[in-house]
Image: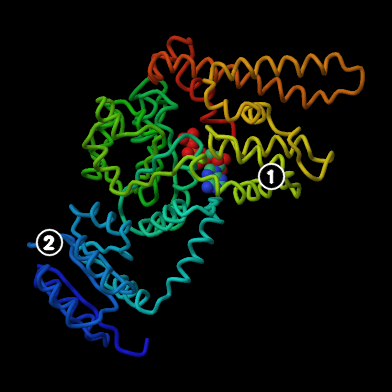
Amino acid sequence: MSKTPNILIIDDEVEVGNFLNHLLSSKGYDVSVGYSGTDCNQLLEREHYHLAMLDVKLPDTSGLSLLAKVKAKFPLCKTIIMTGYSTVKTAVEAIKLGANDYIEKPFDDIDQLETLIDELLDGTVTSEQSTMDKLAKDSGFMIGESQTMKQLVTMAYKISKKNVNVLIEGETGTGKEVLAHYIHLASKRMEHPLIGINCGAISEALLESELFGHEKGSFTGAFKERKGVFEIASSGTLFLDEIGEASLSTQVKLLRVLETGEFMRVGDESIRKTNTRIIAASHVNLVNAVQEKRFREDLLYRLDVVKLTIPPLRERKEDLPSLITYLLEKHHSSLHFSNEAMNVLMEYDWPGNIRELSNVIKRAVVLADGEVNIIGTDYLPEKLLSSQTHSPPEQLLDREESFEVYLKRWNQKILSLWKTEGEVDLSSVLIQVKELETEVGKAFVQRTLKSTIGDRKVAAERLNISMRKLRYLLNEKGSS
Ligand SMILES: Nc1ncnc2c1ncn2[C@@H]1O[C@H](COP(=O)(O)OP(=O)(O)OP(=O)(O)O)[C@@H](O)[C@H]1O
């Protein structure tokens, strides 16, 4: 940049304006300071700015509306939103609206602030892109081609360095855990542990002991004292999977840690401190759970400072080809799919999302390896093919009907193999038997869920199985 960059600062706190003016002028930048929306409007008429630093909350307007004005007048102008703790959510919103970054006041790391400003003005954003790509590779997160995923990952990268909690929502198998791994690797906590806990998979008592630790003798089986993950991951990241399934009593304890950073081990009265960062995930919509009184509103407020929603695979089919290539490589295969097989993969709805895709690819690779170079439709599971055969009327078929079709076809296929006099590949038959088991389990669960209007607990009771088993049957865990 040949001309000295102009920086615009708008903040109603005079000291903030003075401080930044002093800091940035001494670095050789031209600085203009205003204290309100009116000042900002006037200054925007006078100069051409390269960087604008805008306070979120101003007496006569909001930083978000100033952001829109700055961007409309100077599309290339870089923008930083300045926020206090109570307005971090708005600052995150500003990033979604195109702000380059946000900083929290009071500024506790001036070096970092200077680096951010220098980098934005130098245009070193391209190196940021390559860092983002490298991190995605290292964490096993395939971004894909869709704009939604690109924006989601950019957002995840930007907030990874901040000390804010993150909530990741998305259907089962969409990659919430992999995204949490990505955020941890991109954060300043990467040298410290990332620990994951599934809040729905264990009993309330065990979950509390896992989270907070326990003292010797605090319950039957507590033979010695044990640290909980809030202690172990104190400098790292805690991934709380299926947070919506934590009991209301555990939610109260979690809220306390989030508000104060304090907790107590089970069976101990002494207060301990933690500095862990929480990334929570849920496949259910927590806003609905709050309305249904199953989830505390105040806890949700603390958790979703940044909310990242991963769209289901069926809504971003343009990502399928790169995901398929990635997963073939992951399963060490140099095979590829025939055009016909690709069409089937593209047509299918992927209710189990990337986990299901990964399983289908793994299965095809195992079956096709050593037999063919190009994977044809024969190596795809029946459910994908039957969903094709019946489309478009498939959309009209409800799940129960398609399950009956599936059963009939499965039966016919095995009977015809049985009647074959020639060689039979028994391993492949047995894989199909396993698949049948999965489909039968899933069909019963889905039918029951329909009658309980989605209430998993009641459905599990009616089927006489545990919640864990129910999730397993829905292919939500343990099958990848
Ligand atoms: N973007 C992605 N790139 C590569 N692999 C992915 C991606 N997303 C998901 N996967 C793979 O899909 C499987 C499921 O991912 P993950 O466990 O992160 O999903 P999830 O949303 O946390 O699921 P659940 O809600 O059931 O816990 C894993 O094997 C993971 O490696």
Q: Tell whether circle 2 marks a residue whose Cβ is less than 8 angstroms from ligand 1.
A: no
Q: Would you place residue 398 above or below residue 5 in this image? A: above
Q: Amino acid at mark 2?
A: Thr
Per the image, label 1 sits on a secondary structure element best described as loop
Q: Would you place residue 72 above or below residue 141 in this image? A: below
Do the residues under discs 2 and 1 have CB atoms within 8 angstroms?
Answer: no
Q: Which residue is mark 2?
A: 61
Q: Which residue is mark 1?
A: 331
Is 394 positioned to the left or the right of 109 in the image?
Answer: right
Q: Quadrant of the C terminus?
A: top right
Q: CA distance from mark 2 to mark 1?
A: 54 Å
Mark 2, residues whose alpha carbon is within 10 Å: few (<14), some, or many (≥20)?
some
Residue at (48, 40) in percent of width and height:
312
Q: Residue furthest right?
A: 422
- Number of numbered discs on residues: 2
Per the image, label 2 sits on a secondary structure element best described as loop
Residue at (83, 15) in percent of width and height:
418
Q: Would you place residue 186 above or below residue 376 in this image? A: below
Measuring from the top left, give residue 475's x and y in whole percent.
Answer: 54, 28
Measuring from the top left, give residue 240's x and y in whole percent.
Answer: 39, 38
Q: Amino acid at mark 1?
A: His
Marks 2 and 1, the one that precedes in the sequence: 2
Measuring from the top left, give residue 441's x and y in whole percent.
Answer: 57, 17
* Colour scheme of the picture: rainbow
Residue at (60, 48) in percent of width and height:
323
Measuring from the top left, give residue 204's x and y in whole percent.
Answer: 36, 24
Nearest to the observer: residue 321 or residue 223: 321
Nearest to the observer: residue 199 or residue 443: 443
Q: Tell whether circle 1 marks a residue whose Cβ is less than 8 angstroms from ligand 1.
A: no
Is 114 positioned to the left or the right of 319 in the image?
Answer: left
Q: Residue furthest front?
A: 393
The quadrant where residue 272 appears: top left
